[in-house]
């Protein structure tokens, strides 16, 4: 995904930042606890298409970003 596009995108629920999870091809909103899918290089920023993140997933993402 283009990094400039990623900088412009925000969570439709919280209007907060999104983090790219390349492994799962998702854009993650930690504050909303949602992961939005990316299909054919197109982010699907619809709340009803997002999946809810578990506590374990949020912790894993926090560890990954603090290690970067």
Image: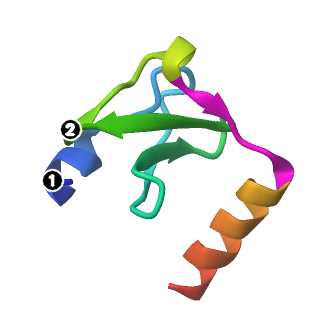
Residue 58 rendering spot, x and y as whole percentages: 73, 56
Kindly report the distance in space between the C-alpha atoms of the residues bearing marks 2 and 1: 18 Å
Instruction: Name the image quarter holding residue 52.
Output: top right
Tell me which residue sits at (24%, 41%) in the image. 8
Quadrant of the drawing holding the N terminus: bottom left
Q: Is residue 11 left or right of residue 31?
A: left
Q: How many marks?
A: 2
Seen from this angle, which residue lies furthest right? 55
Tell me which residue sits at (62%, 30%) in the image. 51
Instruction: Residue under label 1, please give it.
Output: 4
> What's drawn in magenta, residue-wise?
50-55
Q: Is residue 30 left or right of residue 15?
A: right
In the image, residue 65 sits, relative to residue 1, either above or below, namely below
Q: Is residue 18 visible?
A: no
Residue 49 rendering spot, x and y as whole percentages: 50, 19
In the image, residue 40 sits, relative to residue 45, either above or below, namely below
Residue 30 vs residue 47, the one in the foreground: 47
Instruction: Residue under label 2, please give it.
Output: 40
**Contact, mark 2 vs mark 1 (Cβ under 8 Å):** no
Instruction: Name the image quarter holding residue 35.
Output: top right
Residue at disc 2, secondary structure: loop
Instruction: Give residue 43's mark.
Output: none
């Amino acid at each position: 995904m283009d990094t400039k596009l990623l900088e412009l995108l925000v969570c439709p629920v919280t209007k907060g930042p999104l983090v790219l999870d390349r492994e799962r091809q998702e854009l993650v909103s930690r504050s909303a606890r949602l992961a939005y899918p990316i299909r054919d290089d197109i982010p699907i920023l619809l709340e009803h298409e997002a999946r809810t993140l578990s506590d374990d997933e949020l912790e894993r993402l926090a560890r990954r970003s603090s290690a970067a």
